[in-house]
Amino acid sequence: MYSEAGATECKWCWHGHYQPLPGQSACLVVTAGYYTALPDGRPGPVTKQTICPAGTYTPYDGYPASSCLPCYDGKWQPLTGQTSCIPSHWGYAISASPQPNPKLSGHSCPDGTYAPEGSNACIMCPAGQYTSVWVSEKCHPAAIGRHVPEIGMNHDIQCPEGSFTNETGMATCIKASKGYIGSPDRTSQIPCSKGMYQSETGKTECSWVRAGYYVPDDGLPHVTPIPCPDDQTSGLLATKCSLCPSGAYIDTATKLIVLAQNGKYQPLSGQSFAQLTSPGYYTSTLWSGNIIARHCPAGTIASTRGQAACTPCNAGKYQPAVGSTACINADPGYIVPADNKPHTTQTACGAGTVPNAQKTGCVAGTTPMTFSPSSVWSSLIRAPFMKAHIVPGTGANTASIISTAVYNDGSAFATVE
C-alpha cells in the first residue's frame, strides 16, 4: 500500500505495481518478466512481484496482469522471468492453443512431416519430397531415378521398369517415349538405333529389325524400321540393306532372300525373281543358289521348264545326247532295261531271243518282221533277219506271201506277188 502527501488514508497498489515496505508514498513498478497476482484486475495489498515461470513471460515493466502470458503458437520459453518467447526449434511444432510451453519434448514432428523454426503445426511433405526421420527442418527431394507419388511419405520409390526421372523432386515417373527404352537405373531413356527400334512407350527392350528392313547406326531414336528397296534386302539387326547376290532373289512380299534352286536360277544380283530352266536343263538344291542352269547329262531328259532334276531314260528308251527333252525308243531287236538308271545306248537281243513287249528285256523266240511290198516288188525277197518269218506289210500296195522258207544261216525267203 501507499499514501500520497496530505492523504488521510492508504491506497492499494494496482496491477503492475507493488510495495513491500510500509509508509511509502508510491508503489513500485513490476519488473518485466514478473507479475503481481491480483484477481479480476482490482487493486489490492500487493507486497511483492512474482517471477514468470518457464513457458510464460511479461513484455515490459509494469505490465498490468495478474498472470504471465503463455508462450504458444510456435513459441516457447524454457527460462523463468523472461520478457518474450522464443520461436520453436525446427522440427518441432507448438500449437496455437494458449497453454504455456516451457519445453519442446512432445512437440517433435514425425517422419513424413517437417517444421521450420517457429511452426505451430507439422507440415506434410509434398509429393516429390519426403523425410525419413523425426524432427526435420525440411523435406528431401526424391532422387533421380526415383519418385514420391503421395504427400506425407517417409521414403522415395524407384521408378517402374520402362520409366525414369532425370531430375530430383519428381512426384511421377516419365514413361520412355516411342523410339526409346528406359535405362536400367531409371535415370534416363536410351534411343533405339543400330538395327533396333521401339514403336511403344514405357518399354525396357528395343525390337529387333527383321529381314528386309534396317535401322541405321545414327544414335537417333527410331519408332519403326525402314524397309529395304525392292532390289535389296537385309538380315536381323541390319543397319543397312544390300543387293541380293546372284544365285538368289528377293521375295518382295516377305523381303527375304530366296535361293534360286529346284528348277530355278538367277545369274544377276539384285533381282526380285528367278528364271525357270529351259527344257533339257535343270537346277537342283544348292546351298549357295544356282547362277546357271545345267544341261541334263546323256541318258536323261527334262521335258518341261523348271525341272529340279532330269528324268532317266530307261524301260525301253535311251538318249545318247546331253540337254535332251525326250528319250528315244529302242529299235526293233533292241532293249533298254527298266532299272530307273540313265541309259545312253540300247542293247541288241542275242541269238534265239527277242525283245519283250516293253523292250525292257529279251525273251526266247523269233522276231516278227513286217514286209512292205509297196517299196519292193520282187517275186523273191531275202529278209536280213535271223530265223525270222515274213508277214504281209500294210502299205498301199499290200503283197500276198506265196511261200516262206528259213535256212540254216538264218536267212528267210519269201515269194510274193
Image (cartoon, rainbow, N blue to C red):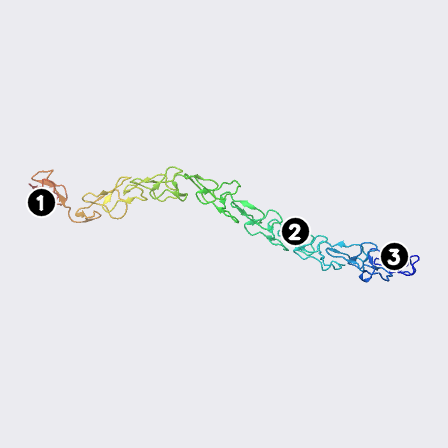
Residue drawn at 34 percent across, 41 percent down: 264
Q: Nearer the viewer, mark 3 or mark 2?
A: 3
Q: Quadrant of residue 132?
A: bottom right
Task: Quickly name the residue at label 1.
Answer: 405
The answer to whether residue 154 is left or right of residue 266 is right
Q: Residue furthest right?
A: 6
The amino acid pointed to by label 3 is Leu
Tag 1: amino acid: Ala
- The answer to whether 378 appears left or right of 117 in the picture is left
In the image, 74 versus 403, the foreground residue is 74
Give whichever of 406, 283 is nearer the camera: 283
- Relative to 299, does residue 8 appear above or below in the rendering? below
Quadrant assignment for the C terminus = top left
- Distance in Å between CA atoms under marks 3 and 2: 55 Å
Eyeballing the image, is 190 above or below 93?
Answer: above
Q: Which residue is mark 3?
A: 28
Disc 1 secondary structure class: strand
Q: In what element is the residue under mark 2?
A: strand
Between marks 1 and 3, how big is the CA–CA gap?
184 Å
Task: Say few, some or many: other residues with alpha carbon within 10 Å of mark 2 (under 14 / 14 to 19 / 20 or more).
Answer: many
Q: Position of residue 225 (x, y in %)?
A: 47, 43
Number of marks in the rendered image: 3
What distance separates the C-alpha of mark 1 from that of mark 2?
A: 130 Å
Mark before the other along the chain sequence, 1 or 2: 2
Which labelled disc corresponds to residue 145?
none
Q: Which mark is residue 140?
A: 2
What kind of residue is marked 2? His
Which numbered disc, 3 or 2, marks the residue that appears first in the sequence?
3
Q: Nearer the viewer, mark 1 or mark 3?
A: 3
Asked which secondary structure carries label 3, the reply is: strand
